[in-house]
Image (tube, grey):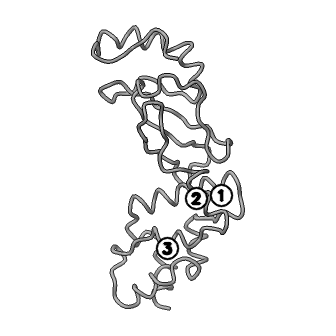
Amino acid sequence: EAARRALAQQGLGVFTWSNAADELRRRLALLRRELGKPWPDVSDAALLDRLDAWLGPELDALASGAPATRIDLGPALRRLLPWPEASDLDVLAPERLEVPSGSRVRIAYPALDDTGARPIVAVKLQECFGWAESPRLVGGRVPVLFHLLSPAGRPLAVTDDLASFWSGPYAQVRAEMRGRYPKHPWPEDPW
């Protein structure tokens, strides 16, 4: 009970969120925003209201003296996944996106409080050649925002419409970049 009271007073900031737990929380927040129930509300207030539903064993560990900074919240958040919808998590909101080059690029999901933001994929422009249609997540509801990078990893363009990028602005990007990066492909026809 003391651990519950401490969390109610201090909030979830007492925990050190691992990258994996934070990413899972962001993915769940996007699913909740776009699909609603049965995907769980993972806001601080909602999680604090439902401590026993997701944090039971971790509360016992805290009560036994385990430091809050060593608690892994990833498995705890997974306890909130609805069944049978949980099996669709990696289809609706995958961790990575496979691009035409074959690479699997990590998707950066928006922060919990940024309700208008979209998932972002930062990838080298050359890895997207031939991709006519921009991928969409959450069953086609949410377009991915691409940050297309130079071979050095610097931003060249931001788009959620690859088809119009290849048909328009790509020609200017190609003209500017092929002299700077001559060893990398800059075809006239990116399709």
Q: CA distance from mark 2 to mark 3?
A: 13 Å
Q: In the image, residue 15 lies at what x, y percent?
A: 40, 71
Residue for badge 2: 28
The residue indicated by pointer 1 is 32
Horizontal side of residue 76 vs 31, given as left or right:
left
Q: Position of residue 89 (x, y in %)?
A: 59, 57
Front position in the image: 181 or 70: 181
Tell me the amino acid under the disc marked 3. Answer: Ala
Left/right placement of residue 170 relative to residue 133 reads left
Residue drawn 42% across the image and 12% down it: 187
47 w.r.t. 121: above or below: below
In the figure, residue 90 lies in which quadrant?
bottom right
Q: Residue at x 33, y 80 (%)?
A: 67
User: Helix, strand, or loop for circle 1?
Assistant: helix
Circles 2 and 1 in contact, beta carbons < 8 Å: yes
Q: Secondary structure at mark 2?
A: helix
Mark 3, Cα crowd under 10 Å, few <14 / some 14-19 / many 20+, is some
For disc 3, the marked residue is 76
Q: Residue at x 32, y 18 (%)?
A: 184
Tell me if residue 79 comes above or below residue 159 in the rendering: below
Amino acid on which the number 2 mark rests in the picture = Leu
Q: Is residue 117 above or below residue 129?
A: below
